[in-house]
Image (tube, rainbow, N blue to C red):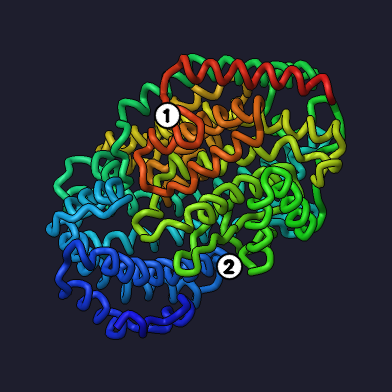
Amino acid sequence: MFNTLPQSAQEFMKWNWAQIEPYFLDLESRELNAANVDAWLADWSRLTDLLSEANSRLFIATTLDTADKAAEKRFIDYLEQIIEPHEPHEQKLREKLLASGLEPEGFEVPLRAIRADVALFREANIPLFTQEKKLSNEYEAVIGAQAVIWEGEERTLPRMRPLYQNADRAVREKAMRLVLERQFADREKINSYWQQLFGIRAQQAANAGFSDYRTFRWQVMGRFDYTPEDCQQFRDAIEQTVVPAAVRIYERRRQHLGYDTLRPWDLDVDPLGREPLRPFTVVADLESKTEAIFRRVDPQLGEHFATMRRENLLDLENRKGKAAGGYQEDLAAIKRPFIFMNAVGLQDDVQTMLHEGGHAFHTFESIGLLYNAQRHFGAEIAEVASMAMELLAAPYLAESEGGFYSEADAARARIEKLEEMILFWPYMAVVDGFQHWVYTHAADATDPAKCDAAWGELWGRFMKGVDWSGLDDFRVTGWQRKMHIFSDPFYYVDYGLAQMGAVQIWKSALNDQTAAVKQYRAGLALGGTRTLPELYAATGARFAFDAGTLGELIVLIEQTLEALEAKT
């Protein structure tokens, strides 16, 4: 009967649950044995791919215009009317596969995840997951709607970012204070979302028999290869090896600018008084030059990106009402990625484009895996794909390579990226440490003042070198502006771990770029069929948390920064 499934997710989105359920019942009723397990898995995967892509397309529509209430309703209706009733059937299929005792080739690691899913499943949690997603969407709508009036013109907050590069310090300060005040104005509303989200998450954990949400979420995320204690070790390593390097960067910037102290609005302006990098003015140039860069990294990767351009799988330009940030979303049935971002003409946009391109290449490279479950992989390796691509593409940023800049400006862009990497690790430690705090301090976690205090304490520990005096309300409420805390709990350490993997791949590329890219692609092609340490090794890195490994990478980055400075 599976030959009667729609060929496209767009058509599948029109189906109701009564049309979909018979396909699950068919899979549940079949005898499962070694002779037919491959066909059974293929049918299950096809159905899952359609469900997943329909979900992705409906979600994407809510981010393209957060004010589109019809799109929001279609997405929520799908969660409630299709995803919720499908979950018990999905559980039965997982149980059926496990009960068969069969272990298809290349399915060892996916089976590990399936066992965890079976153990965690509680029907009472299904509507709670939907409620959680609703609240996350409402939070993102609040953020996406934020705008200010600047010189008589309404501007979204992302469109204020170029002003932070203005040579006039007074302009920078005025712009940043305006943005911070606008964000702070939504404080009470965001506090309410947070309190509701925390309560829902605590109930999910309790329903599944867990004493705290962190332990529950760890299993939900499939974190089988490391522990919360490893994250603590990682944060300690950052404090020991990275924070001093970050302070050195801030101090150099302060000296170049000639200020007594470095303020938050002094972090984006060029410290030597040069005009800000403006890589493009129209998104078409961002697309075409990014494609040229990807073709220099690897011809096939360039062709992947060209496919996305031809098939309209990019939505890059900032506009009012668009959700904040950037992401790559898989369209599982057509085995294609979609990239969303908010480009406004900055070097940061180029880095975001390269980053999300790396995610997209992960999707393309793992297309050859037969089953949906094999194409599921954790964020820790997904972010290696994206962060490594930023570094592998860096040698081709110059116009002579098809990129955006003169040789000197290309060196500037690379300096900005490498400095940003060092500065990111301490910030990541704040976000990760905060999430561990809130979910292990349930009695305090819904008190906004105590959340502010916890964030402020972590900020003081890791974010040294910048003077926030007189801005304490804005500083301690920074957690409200970090989307991951609201939408993707515990998804942030992944970036820090992946950055370690990415720098190791880049280190190899400094010796042999072609070989490093080949190994990178080979690792991505494995999808989720290996353990996390094995996937890192396959891409050319070691999965690590220790100060020794991190310290070696900091030395490499600082040495490279010194060499690049000579070119600017």
Asked if the residues shown at circle 2 and circle 1 are in contact, with their CB atoms under 8 angstroms apart, the answer is no
Q: What element carries label 1?
A: loop
Give whichever of 251, 169 is nearer the camera.
251
* Amino acid type, label 1: Phe
Give whichever of 66, 81 is nearer the camera.
81
Instruction: Indicate which disc residue 65 carries.
Output: 2
Residue placed under numbered mark 1 in the picture? 543
Picture residue at 67% right of the left edge, 33% below the top: 417
Task: Identify the image quadrant of residue 86.
Answer: bottom left
* Amino acid type, label 2: Asp
Picture residue at 49% right of the left edge, 32% below the top: 496
Where the N terminus falls, by quadrant? Answer: bottom left
Give whichever of 91, 342 is nearer the camera.
91
Where the C terminus falls, by quadrant? Answer: top right
Q: Is mark 2 on a helix, strand or loop?
A: loop
Label 2 vs 1, first from the N-terminus: 2
In screen coordinates, is 341 left or right of 140?
Answer: right
In screen coordinates, is 419 left or right of 219?
Answer: right
Say if 457 sits above or below 315 in the image: above
Residue 152 visible to an observer of this rendering: no
